[in-house]
Amino acid sequence: MNNRELLTVAEKYGSPVYVYDSEKITSQYTRLTSAFSKVKHLRIHYAVKALSNISILSLFQSLGAGLDTVSIQEVKLGLEAGVEPSKIIYTPNGVSLEEIEKVAEMGVQINIDNLSILEQFGTRHPKVPVCIRINPHVMAGGNTNISVGHIDSKFGISIHQIPHVLRIVENTGMNINGIHMHTGSDILDIEVFLYASEILFDTARHFKDLEFIDFGSGFKVPYKEGDIETNIEELGEKLTAKFNSFCKEYGKDLTLAFEPGKFMVSEAGKFLVKVNVIKQTTSTVFAQVDSGFNHLIRPMFYGSRHEIHNISNPGGKERFYSVVGYICETDTFASNRRISEIKEGDILAFDNAGAYCYSMASNFNSRFRPPEVLWHEGEAHLIRQRETFEDITRGQLKVDFSVQTEL
Ligand SMILES: *Cc1c(COP(=O)(O)O)cnc(C)c1O
């Protein structure tokens, strides 16, 4: 999508607006599957929580991907998008046995990450195949909030508890068909995956009826010019060799699975906002836009960086700006950024707005969530409408205070 195309989207659908490029999503999917083309059975489960619009899910379905889900609602969205239940894996953390049972009834692959639920589920449904989520205790991931493999993490069953897992499996007669890990987000170093793979293989040797090994995700994507990213091609080459030789030893061609979210959709997304006010203070120039952390919380939530371009004046003289939102709280998208000269009314485009942006948006300040547009084969398709005031009041119930109760 070029600047001119983005401007036509902002004109047609107003601002703020999210725009996703189907071509970029497709090329990321192809890049990952090509890197692992020498694995006999490969399954990519797109992590729904990154961007959960039904049209995006159905794009993945058309590419041949499955889905990784973390709630029953995400499972239902996947089914709504036409994804077969057998191609959906459900990896919740700390949810009730009741919800897990409901999802299992839908024919979705269950992935259990604690001993308590494993024992209860195995006792009640010994015939339902279950994957177990292992915590390999590999330190990885960017911000501490997105690193989930460390010793204090709430995710997964510790590798030190494998003897206990084996006892539960033996006592219940349940069938473990997969081993899974997901150690965090923004993993740059492929050695992390390679080292963790050895731990997964060691774990896998204890189970005789496996069908797949799931290496989770956490691939790092570039956020700015010159940023380094996970070397997917090198990972593909090295992990394929390890995986194929493990399959030989195991005596069966297992499926190798990944479940990327950010890698698939981050770079495909742009967030377009309009500048309402240019405010010069004693220390900085603020560009105040018609959005805030209600629509894109990542910079305030985990200090993440989004490049910002003035697509209304792309060749203009660069100046330093702080780009801030309209929310009544500190609401900074970027400080001290070089952006080509901004005038009130200009449209700014945020990069990396595909993953964890719309899906984390809220109605804080009672603002509407923005529309979402899919740019597909040279055309803009509206895939979610801008909210209206009815969306804000829906479900709210009024108490009638005018009726005085008799004392
Ligand atoms: C969030 C999540 C993912 C996706 O992580 P990314 O960093 O977006 O690729 C994969 N698997 C599980 C279990 C997750 O919770």
Image: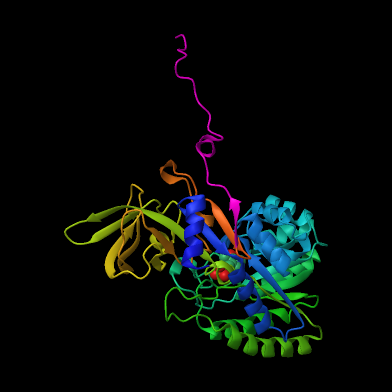
Q: Relative to 249, say whether 218 is above or below.
A: above
- Magenta stretch bounds: 379-407
Q: Is residue 32 magenta?
A: no
Q: Is residue 390 magenta?
A: yes
Q: Position of residue 2 (x, y in %)?
A: 50, 68
Report the front residue among 253 and 83.
83
Residue at 54 percent of width and 56 percent of height: 359
337 sits to left or right of 298? left
Residue at 56 percent of width and 62 percent of height: 20
Please identify the residue farthest to the right as the structure is shown. 127
Q: Is residue 90 visible?
A: no
316 sits to left or right of 401? left
Q: Position of residue 153 (x, y in %)?
A: 52, 67
Most common secondary structure along the magenta stretch: loop
Report the front residue among 366 and 7.
7
Residue at 68 percent of width and 72 percent of height: 44
